[in-house]
Image: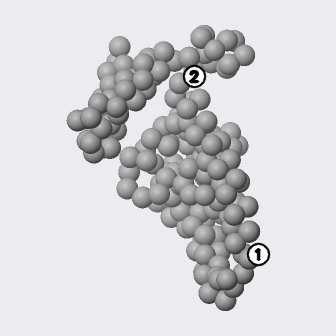
Amino acid sequence: MTYLWLFLEFLQTGLFAVGGGYATLPFIQKMMERYPSWFGSMKLADIAAISEATPGPVGVNAATFAGYSAAGVPGALIATAALVLPSFVIISLVVRALERYRQSRLVGELLFTLRPAVTGLIAAAAWSVVYAALFVAPLSGGLLQAMNWGNVALYLVLLGLLFVPKVKNLHPVFFFLAGGIVGAVMGLI
């Protein structure tokens, strides 16, 4: 039964998460609330960080992780296949339609109107990750009390390093490693 639910949940995510991997994060957050056993003790920010740090699209990596946590290797394969299946089918159909209606004004307007929806999904995913990384309590208790000041300091240092000319040209992996090392040290303190 777990396989069926994995398939249906990630099929739905793949069908409605328009805009790429980060657009899947709000759907995955809802899944984390409905099926906490699939994700163990992981938080959305952890999944996003692991998915971003590993090769491949964020959404696919998150689906693979959730599927593996829920049902081992078969679960990982089912969740991943379910996530990419709608995109594969839709893109196959869209390519055929675009070849036929490439010059259509209606098609151009349709694609133009999808942009705000995609932007909104990506913004929702970004807010979820920022909130999980920088806040430890609900905002209702006050902004200053809700902040995780260690993470805020780490964020500001790494952001500041982006403006240093020699550091700015470093490979992004450096920032992942530096953030991971500092985060691990902060976790030990």
Residue 110 versus residue 181: which sits nearer the camera?
110
Disc 2 element = loop
Q: Identify the residue at horizontal 68%, vertical 39% (top origin).
A: 33
Q: Is residue 32 above or below residue 188?
A: below
Q: Which residue is mark 1?
A: 106
Q: Identify the residue at horizontal 34%, vertical 38% (top origin).
A: 176
Q: Is residue 135 above or below residue 121?
A: above
Residue 55 versus residue 111: which sits nearer the camera?
111
The kind of residue on which mark 2 rests is: Phe
Residue 9 versus residue 5: which sits nearer the camera?
9
Most extreme residue toward the bottom is 100
Residue depth check, mark 2 versus mark 1: number of the one nearer the observer: 1
Residue 18 in sight here: yes
Left/right of residue 4 with respect to residue 88 in the rendered view = right
The kind of residue on which mark 1 rests is: Leu
Residue 37 in sight here: no
Disc 1 element = helix
User: Residue 14, how many percent across, how many down?
Assistant: 63, 62
Q: Which residue is mark 2?
A: 135
Q: Identify the residue at horizontal 40%, vertical 29% (top origin).
A: 159
